[in-house]
Image (cartoon, grey):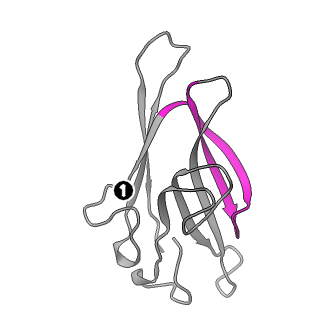
Amino acid sequence: GVRHNPDTTTPAGFKQSIEVAAAAGGGLYPCGTAGPALIRLAWDDFTTGPSTSPIQVRAAYVLLSVPGQSQLALHRVVCAGSASVVSDTVLAHDVVSASVGCPSTTATCGQSGAALPLTVSLTLTIHDSNSGSAVNYVVVLTGQRRQT
């Protein structure tokens, strides 16, 4: 997550680091120009060592239309140190719809401090138009927060 500097150890030292339905150029952690983001995650990257300032990394999960198709593609857009895109990866094709949830009894996605969500879920409804079936597939991707 994103931390209040210089506090790097206590749970209260964490800022809100999840945004849902955020505009590409808006919100707390803008990233790229495509959007809005289904969900955007931000964290401090201390890869250069504990005594240096961290680089803030942002990952936006965005549904974008595919030319000539009715379904959408799920992209993971990553920015590091600014809102400029450093990578854009297609994670899923044939997406019909998607929703985000933070299934925790004490937190919503937009909490900070000790009330951070423990898990985040992205539910995708996918339809294979080549299958000849009207059946959609539902896939739930769940991430668990690592706070150390």
Residue at screen point 42% across, 85% down: 10
Residue at screen point 50% across, 68% down: 17
Most extreme residue toward the left, as rendered?
Answer: 105
Determine which quarter of the picture holds residue 102: bottom left
Position of residue 102 in the picture relative to residue 38 (left or right):
left
Determine which quarter of the picture holds residue 118: bottom left
Pointer 1 residue: 102
User: In terms of secondary structure, what is the magenta stretch mainly?
Assistant: strand
Q: Is residue 72 above or below residue 41?
A: above
Q: Secondary structure at mark 1?
A: loop
Q: Is residue 83 above or below residue 8?
A: above
Determine which quarter of the picture holds residue 106: bottom left
Q: How many marks?
A: 1
Most extreme residue toward the top, as rendered?
Answer: 132
Q: Is residue 44 above or below residue 6?
A: above
Which three-letter amino acid code belongs to the residue tagged 1? Answer: Cys
Q: Is residue 93 visible?
A: no
Reply yes or no: does residue 54 show up in magenta: no
Q: Is residue 8 above or below residue 41?
A: below
Q: Which residues are the magenta region?
A: 70-96
| Position in image of residue 75 (x %, y %) | 62, 44
Position of residue 109 in the picture relative to residue 68 (left or right):
left
Residue at screen point 67% across, 44% down: 89
Q: Is residue 36 visible?
A: yes
Q: Residues within 10 Å of mark 1 (few under 14, many from 20)?
A: many
| Position in image of residue 30 (x %, y %) | 62, 63
